[in-house]
Amino acid sequence: MNRVGDILNYEALSRGDTLAEQIHRQLVGAIIAGSYAPKERINVRRLAVEMGASVTPVREAVLRLVADGVLGVTEKSAIVVPERGLDEIAEIFDIRRTLEGDMAIAAAKKITDTDVQNLKDTQESFLAALDAGDYQKVLQLNSVFHFLIYQRAESPLRLEFARILWLRIGPTLRYMYPLLHKGRGDHRRHEDIIEAAERRDPEELRNSILADLGSSLEALRRYKQEQAALPPRRVRKRA
Amino acid sequence: MNRVGDILNYEALSRGDTLAEQIHRQLVGAIIAGSYAPKERINVRRLAVEMGASVTPVREAVLRLVADGVLGVTEKSAIVVPERGLDEIAEIFDIRRTLEGDMAIAAAKKITDTDVQNLKDTQESFLAALDAGDYQKVLQLNSVFHFLIYQRAESPLRLEFARILWLRIGPTLRYMYPLLHKGRGDHRRHEDIIEAAERRDPEELRNSILADLGSSLEALRRYKQEQAALPPRRVRKRA
DNA sequence: TTCGGAAATATGATATATCAAATTGCGGCG
DNA sequence: CGCCGCAATTTGATATATCATATTTCCGAA
């Protein structure tokens, strides 16, 4: 369906092309795109209908996300999109710094000319989507951009962990770009990354990526701060 | 049943106390204890009978392990205990160094007197099990020993990743201790760790743990080397 | 005896059924 | 007008059924 599926899918662990697999892939894509909001409840039967499958493979896919901590269960065993507290967010970014920093170092020298071109193309689409206000696409393309680089690190395990972390913050990131956009934030972070990639400079690549992470974390922090001040809001149901 | 379950279980993600949960816990314990050998095939129906449950929750538990990369699936979608190559093992240890090193630093100052006593007790049992040749217990106690410390880091996400990594090498470690024992290896690694823990010295704690990891990796490396030279062996079925 | 392959059996994936707990709706009471 | 409580409905967990492959068994031909 989309390239996000290709890049963000757990190929290493994928079992053939089972129904549960496809559904998982679809859910992953949706989560990365920010289609699920924190606190939203996941309904297995409804998903099953929507996807034209029985509950078994859907449940399998959903529980896989639960196992990865991407989705959560309440005390009353309702499956929900977890809302992350600042502590959790900070920890996620802390580990991301390590993992993605290491991958940047490892990847730098292995980046191909095609990769650079892909980065540029992706960035172009990214900016276009941003201007169009299509934040689903923005989030998708952002992840594609980063993982284009990380893939080159040839460290499948780190890649896997990184994917899990991205999925975990996915729903929270949802609110970030609209805010950044309003503030006309610094979208040249990616430009720095591309430059570093072109030079195949490990340190520079790592640092520019860490800077990007830093500004994301900062934005989320600000967002959370604002939210904490506002009155609690209700969550709308899914059509 | 055993304390390993308590320490190594994914409390953070556990959904109430579902059947699937219990089965998962049991499997985790067994894997950590080295009860499953690489290349061994996992049979969902048989497990279901053994555990007196239907296949649904067993499948759920097993697939959760597959999702975590602890178990694998072959091209013909048979569920197996994966055999790890040297590359994979090296990568696992590489990430373990980072994660467990960070946790050691974070944990050092927070270690309580009770923790130290628990470490000493665990180590005593560990040595006893080693002398008794009870390698299942050796492996269990080794994991308990390490996670006693890691828990104090109060970094649930790192802890989770670490658990996954331990589970991934679990089946491979199976062969390590008998070998180390024969060679009358350096089992004072743990003593160093205990000392560092008593002093609450972050750097020392980290280094002693890294040293422990290093000797494990070395042992596995030697083992793999030897194995590569030997004729391929057949895998026996599970009673 | 050994090998090829068909029949029997086992296994994973999916669908459906059932049950208990949780949620929702609704009507009546204050 | 609001809120309390019971009935209807929903939902997650588990069990069972079914189907398509894969694996094993076993028999006959070379």
Image (spheres, coloured by chain):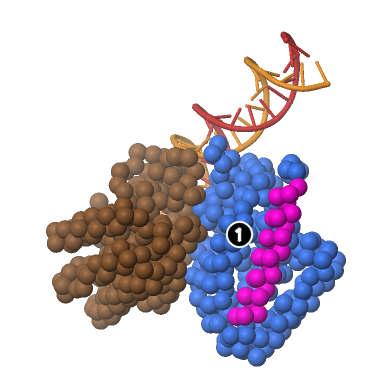
Chain colours: A blue, B brown, C red, D orange
Measured as percent of width and height from the top left, residue A206 is found at 60, 80
Secondary structure type for disc 1: helix
Query: Which residue does the image show at 70% across and 50% down from the upper left?
Result: A228
Q: Is the residue marked by circle 1 packed among few (<14), some (14-19), or many (20+) residues within 10 Å? A: some
Which residue bears the numbered disc 1? A89
The magenta span reads: A206-230
Regarding residue A202, the answer to whether it shows in the image is yes
Q: Residue D29, located in which quarter of the rendered image?
A: bottom left
Type of amino acid at the residue the image marks with label 1: Ile
Measured as percent of width and height from the top left, residue B164 is found at 43, 61
Q: Residue B162, located in which quarter of the rendered image?
A: bottom left
Measured as percent of width and height from the top left, residue A192 is found at 71, 82
A120 magenta-colored = no
Query: Which residue does the image show at 45% across and 48% down from the upper left?
Result: B11
C21 is higher (above) or lower (below) than A146 = above
Pick the front one: A134 or B213: B213
> Which SS type dominates the magenta stretch?
helix
Query: Which residue does the image show at 73% across and 43% down from the upper left?
Result: A232
B112 to the left or right of A58? left
Quarter of the picture containing the N terminus of chain B is top left
In this view, the residue farthest toward the bottom is A199
In this view, the residue farthest toward the front is B199
C18 to the left or right of A234? left
Pick the front one: B82 or A76: A76
B95 is higher (above) or lower (below) than A42 = below
Chain of the residue that carries numbered disc 1 in the rendered image: A
